[in-house]
């Protein structure tokens, strides 16, 4: 995205200056996105384009947004006008516009399309007509809906006709539905419906997930650690993604946050491209023996049966839980897989050809999976046991990588990666380099480091373990890499946001040696064994000691104090809500519980019964088939964290806490299908606990934890879908 400035003129001038600061590699591989959906955006586009075109800056024009505003879409006539006048527009972009409709209009595909689907279809046709790419960035479970909803059949036809133009992209900015979005975008590519797919790494994900400092929640910020940006890129690369986007612009352009780009995203991207580390489609078939095939869905109730297999936010997510495992949804939003054994299971669209389906050893469909345990039994024979440690790791085609599985919690994890053995015994007498060959070596490359820049001296691999460089200059250093079958194990402990990245085809560089015979290490991004600090070790120890209602911002209390007794009660209360056990939840309330407006524990019962589908399904289940969904939710998660102990006595304890409750599978269309409370106020809550004969019980929550009217904002959908 373009870097914002006080005026459009300055934005245009800054863009030219910043673009010219890129090296040839970045200018060859990068395009800059500008938005153009509202009236003032048209003026902005006009101004910026007038600067960008003479400078030869390739532009991606964003023409539709998130439907949060009725003017979220650029009229096609204006799109054509921009294209007619500015030859440097090389791509069009749609972001966040939902395609999740299940109307099934009997008049046919052309009439049952939602307005977003119709617009996307027309833009795809325009991109094909003009030879542009269409960058399409969607979050949640939109890619699955595009692949299977009867409403999207005409849209899918357009995607398939213009496979070379359309780039389905997993937009990584939402705390919900991460695996299904990733695997469904990947599945469009694997199926052959598109020729490529991509990921967009965003610090909005950190904010949306409610993360503040690492190890802490509340409030969510945009200060995402740079290592997590790199991990987002790696999750795409390990699944064959070849297009990478970045948002927000503060993390990419000059300024206090640019280190995320210069220190993490750019060096990782450079390695992926220059070393050709991204697996090709055929290599992903080898790495993915199992796939999930989506059926055609006419109504939302049919679609939600799919989500029971594929999404643990809306539903149970049986297959995803079996593949990835789930650590703690109230701690981590579970973006990074937890189990290195199973890799990726692409989610294939309804119209996947039989020739593609036949390439998988196992193709799962709705109805095949009855439980998480059974899902694991089904897929396990297709994935051999591995010994690569607890950290998530992947090997596909040329790429070998490992990352810590946590996003915001300090847990050290071991990894062990077999990688090509690097050359040893490098010697240089000022005239000839020599090294020790290993059994399995088939050739070597020689590398020069001069004035801080690496270059390869051998155009093709050499067959002898020696090389005489020409034009040796003072300060030059040399290294050797091997093309080899020989392996060595890289063993490391990965801490929060640590990663490793290697090639399976070529070894790491040897130590770099100078004419004086002094050799030094110079690892590339992702090659060095991560170190740790005493501060990180202390955080890991503290995280291991935390109860389920504490994080690193929680006050430390005495292990035998009354606070710990209350935290056990808070944990049990939280778990009862997550189990959808209304009676069990209310058992943690005192009989004389009162809220500030006089409401009693029975008001809490009413609110919980209005919230949970499990409480309403017997009475209203018959409406589900006709209406698609009913405004009630399932699988709640409660993030509850202590912040201060305001009063502690033997009879009463007052604790200031922060909380968030979310639940899924509500009405048919977002945002209402995922509920997130509190709405419209801060996350603070004062909890008063009183000791009774039965133990510690809730006397008061202020503001109230949940009231029936809190659900009102979620009983609607965006207009126009």
Image: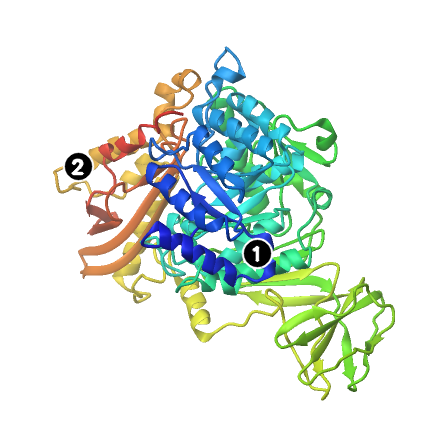
* Picture coordinates of residue 142, whole percent (x, y): 49, 34
* Picture coordinates of residue 315, whole percent (x, y): 46, 34
Task: Indicate whether 113 appears above or below 65.
Answer: above
Q: Report, in whole angstroms, how far the alpha carbon at label 1 lies from the one at label 2.
A: 64 Å
Measuring 41% from the left and 33% from the top, which residue is drawn there? Answer: 74
Q: Nearer the viewer, residue 453 or 275?
A: 453
Q: Quadrant of residue 211?
A: bottom left
* Picture coordinates of residue 64, whole percent (x, y): 43, 35
Circle 1 is placed at which residue position? 27
Q: Which mark is residue 600?
A: 2
Q: Nearer the viewer, residue 600 or 368?
A: 368
Left/right placement of residue 49 relative to residue 477 reads: left
Task: Indicate whether 540 appears above or below 715.
Answer: below
In this rendering, which labeled residue sits more in front, label 1 or label 2?
A: 1
One can see residue 642 in this view:
yes
Q: Which mark is residue 494?
A: none
* Disc 2, SS: loop
């Amino acid at each position: 995205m373009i870097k914002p400035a006080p005026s459009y003129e300055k934005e245009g001038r800054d863009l030219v200056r910043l673009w010219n600061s890129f090296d040839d590699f970045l200018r060859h591989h990068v395009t800059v996105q500008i938005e153009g959906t509202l009236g003032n955006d048209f003026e902005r586009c006009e101004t910026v384009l007038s600067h960008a075109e003479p400078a030869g800056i390739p532009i991606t024009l964003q023409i539709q947004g998130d439907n949060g505003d009725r003017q979220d879409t650029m009229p096609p006539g204006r799109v054509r006008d921009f294209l007619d006048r500015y030859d440097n527009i090389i791509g069009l972009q749609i972001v966040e516009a939902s395609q999740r409709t299940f109307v099934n209009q009997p008049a046919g595909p052309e009439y049952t399309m939602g307005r977003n689907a119709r617009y996307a279809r027309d833009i795809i046709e325009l991109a094909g007509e003009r030879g542009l790419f269409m960058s399409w960035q969607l979050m949640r479970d939109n890619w699955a809906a595009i692949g299977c909803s009867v409403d999207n059949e005409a849209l899918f036809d357009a995607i398939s006709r213009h496979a070379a133009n359309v780039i389905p992209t997993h937009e990584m900015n939402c705390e919900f539905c991460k695996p299904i979005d990733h695997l469904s975008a990947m599945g469009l590519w694997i199926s052959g419906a598109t020729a490529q797919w991509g990921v967009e790494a965003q610090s909005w994900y950190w904010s949306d997930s409610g993360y503040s400092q690492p190890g802490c929640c509340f409030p969510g910020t945009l200060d995402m650690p740079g290592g997590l940006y790199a991990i987002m890129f790696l999750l795409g690369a390990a699944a064959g993604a070849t297009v990478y986007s970045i948002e927000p612009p503060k993390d990419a352009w000059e300024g206090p946050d640019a280190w995320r780009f210069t220190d993490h995203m750019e060096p990782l991207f450079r390695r992926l491209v220059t070393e050709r580390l991204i697996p090709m489609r055929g290599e992903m078939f080898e790495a993915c023996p199992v796939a999930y095939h989506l059926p055609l869905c006419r109504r939302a109730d049919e679609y939600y049966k799919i989500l029971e297999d594929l999404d643990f936010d809306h539903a149970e997510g049986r297959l995803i839980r079996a593949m990835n495992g789930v650590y703690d949804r109230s701690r981590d939003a579970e973006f990074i897989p937890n189990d290195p054994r199973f890799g990726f299971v692409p989610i294939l669209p309804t119209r996947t050809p039989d020739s593609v389906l036949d390439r998988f050893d196992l193709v799962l469909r709705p109805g095949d999976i009855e439980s998480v345990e059974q899902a694991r039994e089904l897929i396990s024979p297709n994935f051999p046991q591995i010994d690569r440690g607890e950290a998530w790791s992947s090997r596909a085609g040329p790429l070998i990588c490992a990352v810590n599985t946590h996003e915001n919690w300090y847990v050290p994890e071991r990894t062990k990666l077999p990688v090509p053995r690097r050359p040893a015994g490098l010697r240089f007498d000022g005239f000839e380099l020599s090294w020790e060959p290993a059994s399995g070596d088939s050739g070597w490359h020689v590398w020069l480091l001069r004035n801080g820049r690496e270059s390869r001296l051998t155009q093709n691999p050499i067959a002898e373990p020696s090389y005489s460089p020409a034009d040796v200059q003072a300060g030059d250093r040399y290294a050797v890499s091997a093309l080899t079958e020989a392996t060595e194990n890289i063993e490391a402990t990965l801490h929060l946001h640590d990663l490793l990245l290697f090639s399976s085809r070529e070894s790491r560089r040897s130590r770099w040696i100078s004419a004086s015979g002094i050799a030094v290490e110079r690892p590339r991004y992702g090659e060095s064994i991560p170190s740790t600090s005493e501060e990180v070790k202390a955080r890991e120890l503290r995280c291991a000691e935390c109860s389920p209602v504490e994080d690193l911002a929680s006050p430390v209390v005495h292990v035998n104090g009354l606070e710990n007794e209350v935290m056990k009660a808070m944990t049990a209360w939280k778990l009862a809500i997550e189990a959808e056990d209304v009676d069990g939840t209310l058992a943690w309330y005192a009989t004389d519980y009162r809220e500030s407006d006089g409401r009693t524990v029975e008001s809490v019962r009413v609110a919980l019964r209005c919230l949970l589908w499990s409480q309403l399904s017997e009475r209203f289940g018959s409406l589900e088939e006709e209406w698609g969904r009913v405004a009630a939710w399932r699988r709640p998660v409660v993030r509850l964290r202590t912040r201060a102990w305001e009063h502690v006595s033997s009879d009463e304890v007052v604790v200031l806490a922060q909380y968030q409750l979310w639940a899924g599978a509500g009405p048919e269309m977002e945002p209402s299908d995922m509920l997130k409370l509190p709405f419209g106020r801060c996350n603070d809550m004062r909890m008063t606990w009183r000791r009774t004969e039965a133990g510690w019980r809730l006397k008061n929550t202020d503001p109230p934890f949940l009231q029936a009217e809190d659900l009102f904002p979620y009983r609607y959908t965006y207009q126009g879908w």
